[in-house]
Image (tube, coloured by chain):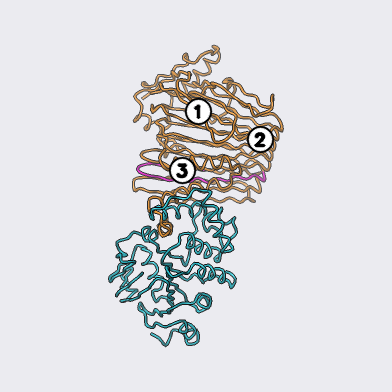
Amino acid sequence: MLTIKNLTATINEKLILKGLNLEIKPGEVHAIMGPNGSGKSTLANILSGKNGYKTEGEIKYEGINLNDLKIEERAQKGIFLAFQYPLEIPGVNTNIFLKTSLNSVRKARGEEALDTLTFLKLIKEKAKELNIDENFLTRQLNVGFSGGEKKKNEILQMKLLEPKLSILDETDSGLDIDALRIVADGVNSYKNKENAFLIITHYQRLLDYIKPDYIHVLSAGNIVKTGNADLGKQLEKTGYANLS
Amino acid sequence: MKHSYDFNIDKIKNLSLEEKILRQKDLDLFYKSGFPTKQIEDWKFTDLDLILNKNFDSISNDVNFEKDNELETIKNFEHNYIFLTNGKIISTNFIYEEKNKILISEYDHKEKNNLDSNNTLALLNNALSSGGFSLEVTKNYKLKKPLVVYNYFSKDLKNKIINNKNSIKLNEGSELTLIDYSNDNTQSNFIKNTIDVISLKKNAILKNILIQNSKSNGHFYKYIKGSLEDNSNYENYILSSGLKLNKIEIEINLNKDNSRCSIYAALNLLEDQHQEIKTRINHNSPNCKSYQKIKNVLNDKSKGVYQGKIFVEKIAQKTDAYQLSKALILHDEAEFDAKPELEIYADDVKCSHGSTSGNIDSDAVYYLMTRGIPKKEAEKILINGFLNEILENLADSEIKIFLEKILERQINGY
């Protein structure tokens, strides 16, 4: 699904990623762990298409050169980034945003746009699965939402857009234990043989709920170690210090 | 450029000799200074004389009041209405209301209006005004449906000036939602100079919504003067985009305790459109509240102006006054000027003001694009959200939905 070969990335003349390689196949869950400043969020941003990075190397997504796709085209083709810090957008109604987003993606896939009633029925179902109060959907997008509510809203968008590759950028930060469980359940119930996850996190605790197939340790712009789910538990004991 | 004006009091019908003399006096006073220029502080960002010189060969007050085109009405909600063509009443309908609760008549131009005599447009209005309405709501009567005042224009308005006055009086405990709705499909360049005099008695509530619903080459000036008594509330919304020139001056006098006013404006300007909102809120009594939120989106070579003054009298303790203007400047040649002013003589008050201008938040655009929304549409959503915020506190959901649709149309340039 995703193949990254020898990726380097620079922002403001600072080299962040230094020749990273990664391969993700359908049905797999990959976790990327690593200390602050190691380049985890940079990787997520580059995959989503954020401007400002100079990159070299190759990123192929379903056989397409990712650099050829605009930000919205990546989303339409099934790449989803759950933000570490979801933006508050005053004046924009959450429901209207979600409907515009879903219909943009549907249109790109050659599907018919959903009318308001069908959409509302769908979004209410999805919100219920994540224990999101319906009233949130009528409020301004993320405005006045708690950290946990914002993160749940990201997962709601993921479930609505049904992406193939979901990138979760520190979705666990700022979540209490109940919210963490709800978010993890949301991910687990969406997981299937066709789609894949890239989970970026500092801590093992999210991985207690979402079992990764691979854990990669990113340090100073490169993957320095790859292992299975046990690597996370080991890191929790020993820290990152001995790895780089 | 005095010689290219053709202002003639004899063109106004049914005036007594005495009225003619009074009007001629005002006209002579107007001629002494002419239309305001930027040398006058209140007009420093809107040089009206220059703008009119550029766009008019001549100006006359020879206005015909006959309806000459089909009038399009609002279908979205049930409402009472007053139809004005070129500012004059054509018909009225209060079918949803009880009898004898609403008094409606043509404006009586003999009434004195005590407007600031430095304002030469007020002088011109006094000299030339005809048409307009007087509306009075009786004590404790709350209108069941909103009132829409339709402003339509005849097709022969090229180089003409319309002057009219309206008066709205809400007696104790009465309530009204008044939508001032302008639709100009004439394409001609004309001037409209209107004075609205508003009086709210104890506990009265007026929601005053100003909507422009078409592009227009008209040059509009409106002066709203409101006087508020105890615990009354004036709420004003302005959604007026697409006008060649528009200046709205709002003077609110919070004359008695606990009176409140709020002004919300959302303007989306394209091309070389120019709009100014100028407010003066006089806190003349204790415990009054005023709130202003002005939002401008400026495209192309357009210009937006906000001059807002809060004046607090010595006796007006416990005043709570707030004003904020925000502008999104989308092109290098667009311009936004803001002049907030506080003049405070009381010592126990809460007054704050702020003004910001900038571009669309690129992080927000990115966020929306990662959800599959193309850039242009993402920007439109954000512009819409920016302007829409002023409707947040509007309780009536039917009208709110209607206004949201108007805003969307305005953002798409009609």
What kind of residue is marked 1? Asn
Q: Give SS at disc 1.
A: strand
Tags 2 and 1 on a common chain:
yes
Residue marked by disc 2: B175
Residue marked by disc 1: B151
Disc 1 + disc 3, Cβ < 8 Å: no
Q: Is residue B130 above or below residue B256?
A: above
Q: Position of residue B413 (x, y in %)?
A: 40, 40
What kind of residue is marked 3? Glu
Q: Which mark is residue A142?
A: none
- Of residues B304 and A40, the one drawn nearer to the viewer in this rendering: A40
- What main secondary structure does the magenta stretch of the protein show? strand
Question: Magenta stretch?
Answer: B286-308
Which chain's residue wears label 1? B
Which chain's residue wears label 3? B
Residue at 62 percent across and 36 percent down: it is B206
Q: Earlier in the sequence, mark 2 or mark 1?
A: 1
Q: Is residue B290 above or below residue A151?
A: above
Q: Position of residue B293 (x, y in %)?
A: 53, 46
Which chain's residue wears label 2? B
Supply the letter of whichever chain is orange.
Answer: B
- Of residues A9 and B317, the one drawn nearer to the viewer in this rendering: A9
Residue marked by disc 3: B408
Answer left or right for A176 relative to A11.
right
Q: Position of residue B282 (x, y in %)?
A: 59, 40
**Neighbour class for label 2 at 10 Å: few (<14), some, many (≥20)?**
many
**Whole-number angstrom distance, CA of label 2 to CA of label 1:** 22 Å
Q: Is residue A214 above or below residue B274?
A: below
What kind of residue is marked 2? Glu
Residue at 53 percent across and 71 percent down: it is A184
